[in-house]
Amino acid sequence: MKRLALILSASLLLVLALPGLAFAQDEAPTAAELSLAMDTVWVLVAAVLVIFMQAGFAMLEVGFSRMKNVGSVVAKILVNVAIAALMFWAVGFAFTFSDGGGLQSIIGLNGFFLSGSAETYAGLSWSQVPVSAKFVFQVAFVAVSLAIVWGTMLERTKFAVYVIFAVVFAGLIYPLVAHWVWGGGWLAELGKQDFAGSTVVHLSGAAAALAGTLLLGPRLGKYDDEGRPVTIPGHNMPLAVLGVLILWVGWYGFNPGSTMAATTQIADVALTTTLAAAAGVLGAMTMSYFYRRNVDVGMGGNGAIAALVAITASCAFVAPWASIIIGFVAGIIMYLVLMFVDRIGVDDPLGAIAAHGMGGVWGTLSCGLFTTPELAAVGQPGLFYGGGFTQLGVQALGIIACGGFVFLSSLLVFAILKATIGIRVSPEQELDGLDIHEHGVYGYPDLVATDPQGANGTSPRGAVSSGRPAESAT
Amino acid sequence: MKRLALILSASLLLVLALPGLAFAQDEAPTAAELSLAMDTVWVLVAAVLVIFMQAGFAMLEVGFSRMKNVGSVVAKILVNVAIAALMFWAVGFAFTFSDGGGLQSIIGLNGFFLSGSAETYAGLSWSQVPVSAKFVFQVAFVAVSLAIVWGTMLERTKFAVYVIFAVVFAGLIYPLVAHWVWGGGWLAELGKQDFAGSTVVHLSGAAAALAGTLLLGPRLGKYDDEGRPVTIPGHNMPLAVLGVLILWVGWYGFNPGSTMAATTQIADVALTTTLAAAAGVLGAMTMSYFYRRNVDVGMGGNGAIAALVAITASCAFVAPWASIIIGFVAGIIMYLVLMFVDRIGVDDPLGAIAAHGMGGVWGTLSCGLFTTPELAAVGQPGLFYGGGFTQLGVQALGIIACGGFVFLSSLLVFAILKATIGIRVSPEQELDGLDIHEHGVYGYPDLVATDPQGANGTSPRGAVSSGRPAESAT
Amino acid sequence: MKRLALILSASLLLVLALPGLAFAQDEAPTAAELSLAMDTVWVLVAAVLVIFMQAGFAMLEVGFSRMKNVGSVVAKILVNVAIAALMFWAVGFAFTFSDGGGLQSIIGLNGFFLSGSAETYAGLSWSQVPVSAKFVFQVAFVAVSLAIVWGTMLERTKFAVYVIFAVVFAGLIYPLVAHWVWGGGWLAELGKQDFAGSTVVHLSGAAAALAGTLLLGPRLGKYDDEGRPVTIPGHNMPLAVLGVLILWVGWYGFNPGSTMAATTQIADVALTTTLAAAAGVLGAMTMSYFYRRNVDVGMGGNGAIAALVAITASCAFVAPWASIIIGFVAGIIMYLVLMFVDRIGVDDPLGAIAAHGMGGVWGTLSCGLFTTPELAAVGQPGLFYGGGFTQLGVQALGIIACGGFVFLSSLLVFAILKATIGIRVSPEQELDGLDIHEHGVYGYPDLVATDPQGANGTSPRGAVSSGRPAESAT
């Protein structure tokens, strides 16, 4: 209406040959300019939320680690974000989203070092925001996928392994898989549905984690002499749940932001994301209550994460009621897989294989079940809407291809590292904790000081220091 | 350029009898579409900030709890958010905002399971954003109100009570009160002012908290043999203040977001919110300094919260200078009420009754004092602007009606629970801490291990383990 | 103008008897209104991110403090934010951005208590957002600058000093410097480049910190009998890194928000900010590895901060590749300065002088090196683009003038305080920790309880309490 009035009146003005119209044009932006600016604001806000997820992973990993290793955890987070940002800038973004010519089904080959124009990165040409906005948003996704890898390999991995694998993963492994699904590669051509990355981001991270863990082996003390799993609790549930809540908040950038445009759809996506997460908490808590007659804090958090992972693929394609089912089932699956994995000798301190891996698998498949005809922007409606098994088959193929490729390529990288520099710290280092050996400082210097005279060179509270050297030193 | 081209071409099109105008409209969004998209972005961003407040409550409650109970705190947060989201989706949103026909003064009765259209939820028809955006924003408010309930009942409440009360509160109690004020109910008809929920969200939560606490009784050891209150300090001031700062940040979604539209008014609301919070810190700190000659960290935080609660009702209606008075007085009131409540035997670990309850009462009343004629979008100007006592009376009626209803209905629910499953853990559980009994794991497993050999099955630091089993096990 | 054209043309249409057009105008906002609303949303979101940085500083300072002082740290954060907000509202904003008449080169002198109109604050007239939005955004910057001051003066400063200096700094010192650069003062007239405040915010904070530290002297135990520096580790690396990550996230409000308008440029600024931070982590970690053969967690975090500080001045003026160099060099400089400062007897627990001070110097200078001709909105292109030494000279002059003025005026304030009320706590208080003396409560009451019978009046775990009084009391 407004636009019609504007056009009508502008026509009259032109007929009347009123000069100065060009001046009036400088005053206020056009609708296209406003739309572009608004999309940019939204994508950037969403990117910031996703970047904030690094704080969530840091707190989650800290919470589920033992005190002696937390410095290592947070050092790794910082270095990994840094490497991911620079590698994705140098080559990863180009591999993922640019045109690959004859190899376009497999990989992009243009615009390295972010030197391309909007056209160069054809895989993202559907969004009008500047290339810089696209990069900042997408690089946050790589960093999430990379963070997932390490949740499983906590408390026993050499720091150099973090560094080297980050280079390869952010520079090549993730970009390949992302290109297949989001960059116009062969899975995109088949109509694979993965709105915000259940497969690309979460399953990829978990597949690499599984590869690394198999080569690492479990932590010392994780299995008793009869091979039964021993619970090694984390040290700080408040920080773990803070991590879960930060991740939950960050997911409102992850899922709704994947529109890469400011549309009303972002609210619909936020709705399915919210309901799924809520149902995931209850799914996992219900399992915990029936199996163990208690309400396990960590399980509740992992249930939320598994559900958020699962809804990531389908958040823009399914009805709210379906999101509740997807989330609840994700919580249950996570719980069962977590127990199963623990029993077969795979030591996964954070539950990343269960939450991100199986959450990713279930979420990817659930697109093939619940996608409604109205919302199927890509691919076909789901099985429950009469879409048949076609889409489900494509989804399964995507899981096998992406999960399989990341697992095998990561296994190769870790195997080479294992054969050369080694991937695991020495038993002595593991028992003492990684912090003091690799980082020269404890995560909590006041609490784990070993010197009864006080680690800080001051021993003010002598009266009570005899039995409590750590606290007394503070 | 774009605009010039558009205008030129539109002129030609008009000359050619208006064909292809629809095509021109496809090119760039209309002003109405842009406005709708912008409003949706803003409401969603605000919703995310309010959802983030759960992390604030979690940290605040953790910080003010003792170590032995922190796992229980964070488990409760996760489960409560989950229940609130699903109950509000199923029935609460409909009760609150839909039309109730003959019962419209009391409750809405349409559009359960979010099945309605924008018209169904007539109480929110003044905002143009999609129903999904309205829901995500409003559900975050329910979760805040519910979180307030538990701050007072920390460290002694059975987990099942959290679960059952959450169902009733998010499904019925909160929706009724919210309907009266925001859903077109009887208080809305009287012109009650409550921009963002001093009454609806904060006073409601505190009234339920008071009901529960009266039935629970104080924590063991809170009062000595002569009935004098004993200070039971929380265990972690840094996390408590982190919680306060997260809540403060979240309030920029809570208050400015309650415009539910992207207008310049959001900045005015952010301004009053900021100034009030600052004044609240100083009000409480001043009291702390004069009464005890020290600067109590927790009091500063509670002063900020009380002020934020108070300005919530009036943030869009008052001048900046008034917001400073409202905030400063809120900090003082909070301090006095906190000490009073403590002395009369009501054990409120977090100060929620003082901060959210009395903050809510004062904030609701302050509308009737400070609302300016220009900003009185609802109701009348305040007493200080010549509006007389009418609005003040309506505000007081709202406090009594909403506070009273929530208190009595919550008392009924808690009394039924007390008579059936019980609401309080056993003394043994309370002394040992809720974590180990109800959740099977400690919040800080490394620090509160009771087994001198180390809880984790590894005892690497034998040399120092004799006197310090907890640390040595890590 | 746009509006005028619309009104003129609409008048013509009305003459032509088109009814209902006025109604159509009510329907949708104009492009100018949309643009204004969008800018307001963006500036407010950015302001919230910058306000969130207070949580980052709190966690960073907590992490680098010893346990006995953390309550003091967080109390200080709350009070400082409160004072900064109210002082900047009363006088600081007017000093900074209003017209000063004959003293305009030095200070603004109109619009105290935020009483002015948009025209009053001429220094910000280039942004169209409401004055309330401008204030909320700018007040967050003052609070950041003030927070930087205290990172260096941790663990030994009297609480009253925090309070009094905050009044002077937020009310006068910061506003003067900010007026010179951003308020149309003499450095602005010379074309000094400082997009988001490497000089104004960060160097100012660090210069005041240096002044205070020189008068305070090092912490007890920081230097041994031969004057060699002793490492006093902080107590909580996870919270320190949480702080770094929150700051990093907040910087996306700090830098891109400094456009104070929703433009596509915000994404370009976010890109340079991201790449610089990543490079800063690697720069500092590389130094740590070569010098000490370990990967120091704190250094990684300080590297990120130093790089973020450095890119703050130039984020809108330089190419992505240049931002990587600026960040990497900032990480290296920070490391070297941190070690140097430590050795010459300046005890800087948080590394603020190195990270914010030298980061600010390097960032300000780097504008004069890397500013591209296309992006030089203010001043001249940099040396590496053929701009010669002019801009570099202006940048250096700005560093000397701003850094020197803040240092000397802060030195004066601290010296007066030292001569009157004193600025340092007693040795006994310092050894015991500030928490118990100034705040009446420990930051972690459970862990530092000195009473073997349990500080909380309950001693439930008697069986194990003999050797572990702190834990047993919980």
Image: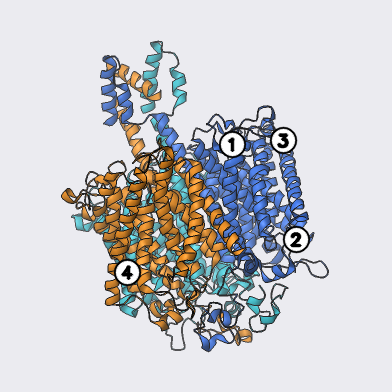
Chain colours: A orange, B blue, C cyan
Q: Is residue C271 above or below residue B6?
A: below
1 vs 3, front mark? 1
Q: Are marks 1 and 2 in contact (CB under 8 Å)?
A: no
Circle 3 chain: B
Chain designation of label 2: B
Instruction: Give the Cα separation between the discs numbered 4 and 1.
Output: 52 Å
Marking on residue A163? 4
Q: Please state the horizontal and vertical placement of residue B97, each as a whole percent of the image.
A: 60, 35
Place of residue A235 in the rendered image (x, y in percent of width and height, measured from the top left): 53, 71
Label 1 near label 4: C-beta < 8 Å?
Answer: no
Q: Which amino acid, by three-letter code, is at mark 4?
A: Val
Badge 3 and badge 4 both on one subunit: no
Toward which corner of the image does residue C463 lie, by quadrant?
A: bottom right
- Secondary structure of the residue carrying tag 1 is helix
The percent position of residue A385, horizontal first and vertical second, equals 43, 38
Asked if residue C373 shows in the view, the reply is: yes
Q: Amino acid at mark 3?
A: Val
Q: Can marks 1 and 3 be said to lie on one chain?
A: yes
Q: Nearer the viewer, mark 3 or mark 4?
A: 4
From the viewer's perspective, is residue C216 above or below residue B292? below
Residue underneath mark 1: B112
